[in-house]
Image: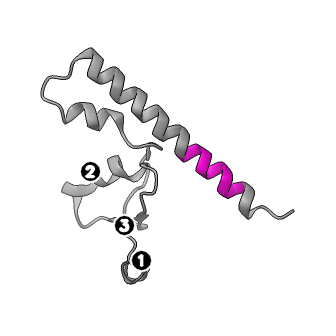
Amino acid sequence: MVSRELTKAGIKHNVLNAKFHANEAGIVAQAGYPAAVTIATNMAGRGTDIMLGGSWQAEVAALEAPTEEQIAQIKADWQVRHDAVLGCRRSAYHWHRAP
């Protein structure tokens, strides 16, 4: 139901459920990126830690033989995204908070 409404509204999203175990790790790895929309059903995501800013480890794992410099750059880029997501969360909290 939520997914259908998001689709109608043209909002790109992923659904994390118990149906597609092969895709689960990829969905979780992408879930924390800024502007990412992920729906987790009650049958999925139990005990799942969604890393805000995405998963730098998944980015490193996608490289065949990452150098220390590449790893350092990926971590630095991740930190920027992580901080951006936290900043959005703080802004949303203050925006929704009653005066």
Q: Is residue 24 left or right of residue 62?
A: right
**Dominant secondary-structure state across the stretch colored magenta:** helix
Residue corresponding to mark 1: 6
Query: Which residue lies most toward the top here?
Result: 68
Going by the numbered disc 3, the residue's amino acid type is: His
Mark 3–mark 1 CB contact (< 8 Å): yes
Q: Residue at x 74, y 55 (%)?
A: 94
Which residue, as the protein is rendered here, is positioned at the far left?
Answer: 64
**Of the residues shown, which amino acid type is indicated by label 1?**
Leu
- Measured as percent of width and height from the top left, residue 50 is found at 43, 47
Is residue 39 positioned above or below 29 on the image? below
User: Which residue is more in the foreground, 97 or 41?
Assistant: 97
Q: Quadrant of residue 10?
A: bottom left
Q: Start and end of the magenta stretch?
A: 85-93
Tag 3 secondary structure: loop
Q: Position of residue 57 (x, y in %)?
A: 31, 33
Residue 84's image quarter?
A: top right
Label 1 or label 2, whichever comes before in sequence order: 1
**Which of the labelled discs sits on residue 85, or is there none?**
none
Going from N to C along the chain, the mark reached first, 3 or 2, is: 3
Instruction: Tell how many labels.
Output: 3
Q: Give the CA separation, mark 3 to mark 1.
A: 7 Å
Viewer-side label of 1, 2: 1
| Residue at numbered disc 3 | 13
Q: Position of residue 7 (x, y in %)?
A: 36, 79
The single residue placed furthest to the right in the displayed view is 99
Quadrant of the drawing holding the N terminus: bottom left
* 81 and 56: which is toward the camera: 81
Q: Residues within 10 Å of mark 2 (few under 14, many from 20)?
A: few
